[in-house]
């Protein structure tokens, strides 16, 4: 049977149709655009015959089918550390899970009580619970690894920058949700070895007022991902139109925010829906659990991503920057998916991100501690 590939008006990456190509960004070609483009200058859909000429491919395919059929999957760089160094992965997992559960207990004790809220910005808030959770987590880490470097959302850099290990701690990811007693929120801890994720734990709060509970996600480099001790795997959904997607928005209403709002609209139109839950570690854990297919966001911090990206990858998923380039936890964008859909999502997300770069938006590494040695 002949295979049909359909392109519409503006940019289609024809090099991506070759298995020999390593390109992951579209090359501009006049007269083509993305399948769900609503441009007034769009030309009618054209059929491109790629295999045997013996059959005629005349049937009309919907926009949704186009989204699912255009791109071939490619190999993406792994984000996990090649090794966990002199400390075994079992030892790192033991300490990281204790630390995350200790912080989660602080949150559980406070979840149904009044909050003392202060603000880092106009809408970016912090509670006493964030600070208390981070304090107990730090105690656990320091007690076990006093020479390790720590990057906490609330406390900043602590420790020796000559260490190969960096603990990225978000003591309460989703503080706004917590402040409103609205799931989702979580404790998120990832430890890096020479800049790459080595072990991770996310304790997610589920339920709601009067019925709060938790579930714990863990992963170590090369050892798989688990939820409450049971191995988990990303979904096998291979079409965008059958996917449930997740994204997030920062506090600055600038160009990246506006770009992502457009992505939100476009993917809402071609998928089963796009959710905005408000906690990056939870969003990524849900991709790993297989209940959503992908998550993306601009301008996250290392403590937002260090745990989640490892959990996704160890569950069989794929991680990259939002332009498809190699990812590190110090990057300013992230796309995680079940892997099957990654290139298909990049059809739209990649060029939108490149356009931001072209406008001078800074996508350089950030929040990387001075003098911290990495192998990125």
Image (cartoon, rainbow, N blue to C red):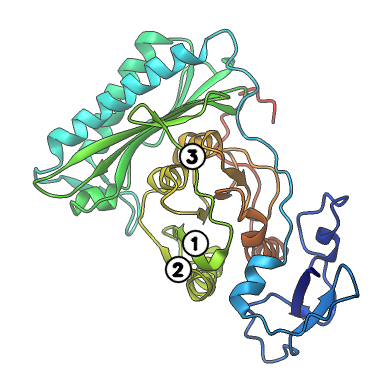
Check disc 1: other Cα within 10 Å, few if <14, some if 14-19, many if 20+. Answer: many
Labels 2 and 3: the sequence-earlier one: 3
SS for callout 2: loop
Q: Residue at x 59, y 15 (%)?
A: 162
Q: Residue at x 82, y 70 (%)?
A: 28
SS for callout 3: loop
In the displayed structure, 146 sits above or below 238; it is: above
Answer left or right for 127 relative to 344.
left
Labels 2 and 1: the sequence-earlier one: 1
Q: Which residue is mark 2?
A: 272
SS for callout 1: loop
Q: Write down the quadrant of residue 4 in the picture.
A: bottom right
Q: Quadrant of the N terminus?
A: bottom right
Q: Tell which of 374 and 320 is nearer to you.
A: 320
Dots 2, 3 in contact, CB < 8 A = no
Q: Tell which of 77 and 119 is nearer to you.
A: 77
Dots 2, 1 in contact, CB < 8 A = yes
Tell me the distance, in whole angstroms, between the alpha carbons under discs 2 and 1.
Answer: 6 Å
Q: Which residue is mark 1?
A: 243
Tell me the distance, in whole angstroms, between the alpha carbons under discs 2 and 3.
Answer: 21 Å
Q: Residue at x 89, y 69 (%)?
A: 52
Q: Quadrant of the C terminus?
A: top right
Q: Tell which of 288 and 94 is nearer to you.
A: 288
Answer left or right for 213 relative to 137.
left
In the displayed structure, 113 sits above or below 69; it is: above
Q: Which residue is mark 3?
A: 233
Residue 174 picture location, percent across and down = 32, 48
Residue 262 picture location, percent across and down = 53, 73
């Amino acid at each position: 049977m002949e295979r049909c590939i359909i392109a519409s008006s503006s940019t289609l990456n024809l090099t991506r149709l070759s298995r020999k190509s390593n390109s992951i960004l579209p090359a501009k070609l006049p007269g083509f655009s993305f399948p769900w483009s609503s441009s007034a200058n769009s030309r009618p859909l054209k059929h491109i015959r790629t295999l045997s000429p013996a059959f005629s491919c005349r049937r009309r395919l919907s926009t949704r089918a186009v989204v699912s059929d255009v791109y071939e999957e490619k190999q993406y760089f792994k984000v996990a550390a090649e090794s966990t160094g002199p400390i075994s992965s079992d030892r790192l997992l033991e300490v990281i899970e204790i630390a995350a559960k200790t912080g989660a207990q602080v949150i559980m004790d406070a979840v149904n009580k009044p909050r003392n809220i202060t603000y880092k910005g106009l809408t970016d808030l912090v509670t006493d619970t964030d600070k208390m959770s981070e304090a107990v987590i730090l105690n656990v880490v320091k007690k076990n690894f006093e020479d390790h470097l720590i990057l906490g959302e609330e406390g900043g850099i602590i420790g020796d920058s000559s260490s190969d290990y960096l603990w990225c701690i978000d003591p309460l990811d989703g503080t706004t949700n917590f402040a409103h007693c609205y799931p989702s929120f979580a404790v998120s801890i990832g430890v890096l070895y020479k800049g790459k994720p080595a072990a991770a734990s996310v304790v997610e709060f589920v339920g709601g007022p009067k019925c709060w509970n938790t579930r714990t996600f863990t992963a170590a480099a090369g050892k798989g991902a688990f939820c409450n001790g049971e191995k988990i795997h990303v979904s096998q959904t291979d079409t965008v139109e059958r996917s449930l997607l997740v994204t997030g928005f920062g506090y600055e209403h600038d160009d990246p925010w506006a770009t992502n709002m457009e992505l939100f609209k476009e993917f809402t139109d071609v998928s089963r829906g796009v959710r905005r839950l408000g906690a990056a570690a939870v969003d990524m854990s849900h991709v790993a659990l297989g209940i959503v297919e992908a998550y993306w966001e601009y301008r996250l911090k290392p403590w937002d991503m260090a745990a989640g990206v490892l959990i996704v990858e160890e569950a069989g998923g794929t991680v990259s920057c939002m332009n498809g380039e190699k990812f590190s936890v110090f990057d300013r964008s992230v796309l995680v998916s079940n892997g099957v859909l990654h290139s298909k999502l990049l059809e739209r997300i990649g060029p939108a991100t490149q356009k931001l770069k072209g406008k001078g938006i800074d996508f350089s590494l950030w929040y990387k501690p001075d003098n911290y040695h990495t192998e990125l």
